[in-house]
Amino acid sequence: MASILMPSGDATEALDTFYPFFRLKEAGYEVVVAGPEARLYHTVLHEIPPDSAIPWDITQERPGYFIRADVAFRDVDPNDYAGLFISGGRAPEYLRYDEDLLRITRAIAEAGKPIACLCHGIEILSAAGVIGGKTVTTVAKCALDAEQGGARYVDEEVVVDGNFVTSRVWHDNAALLRAFLEMLAAA
């Protein structure tokens, strides 16, 4: 059974994470969650409240479920994985500084293995320096992160460019996973 690596940390977005976590397992892949340490992490729910008396310009954050990291980034051998799935939420804001995660991301990208990413996950790809010259999508408030990483940002449901498939937010999960599973099958 091929393994997919899923980086995670506190404040990873619950739907960005759990939908692909279970969908990939359903398709027959082992999903290995990695974090700064092998431990339990908090997820969060991000949504703009539809009936707020005072409108929100950004998403509201609420506590979500927990997810356990099976392994610490420093102990990950990227050669053991068929692909990488990077979810969003606020976790990528600090995970992008983890040199071991950046090493893993670069190695998987350089090997041409499929990489799926949505929402704030683009911050990790940008920090790893692997999206230069690529066309990507992400949540609109992270368009600058994509561009600073040398990518061309477009506002589309899903974008495939080489071994990368990107989406904006968890609302795009079905299209993202469809494309990612096709990439994995073809690899």
Image (spheres, rainbow, N blue to C red):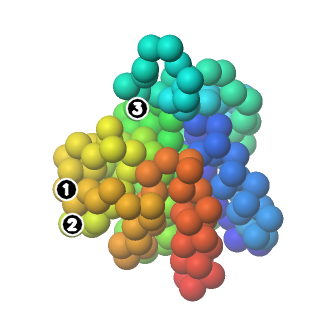
Q: Is residue 69 left or right of residue 79?
A: right
> N-terminal of the two: label 1 or label 2?
2
Task: Report, in whole angstroms, how far the alpha carbon at label 3 lies from the one at label 1.
Answer: 18 Å
Category of crowding for the residue at label 2, using alpha-carbon neighbours closer than 10 angstroms: few (below 14), some (14–19), many (at least 20): few
Amino acid beneath label 1: Gly
Please name whichever residue, 159 or 162, is drawn nearer the observer in this view of the structure.
159
- Residue drawn at the location 27% of the way across and 66% of the way down: 134
- Let me know if residue 11 appears in the view: no
> N-terminal of the two: label 3 or label 1?
3
- Residue drawn at the location 28% of the way across and 46% of the way down: 143
Amino acid beneath label 3: Glu
Q: Is residue 150 left or right of residue 130?
A: left
Given contact means CB atoms under 8 Å apart, are the residues at marks 1 and 2 in contact? yes
Residue 12 at x, y percent in the picture: 57, 34
Residue 9 at x, y percent in the picture: 57, 33
- Element at label 3: helix
Which residue is under mark 3? Answer: 93
Please name whichever residue, 61 or 130, is drawn nearer the observer in this view of the structure.
61
In the image, residue 117 above or below residue 98: below
Q: Is residue 178 left or right of residue 91?
A: right
Which residue is under mark 2? Answer: 133
In the image, residue 40 above or below residue 2: above
Residue 106 at x, y percent in the picture: 38, 58
Amino acid beneath label 2: Gly
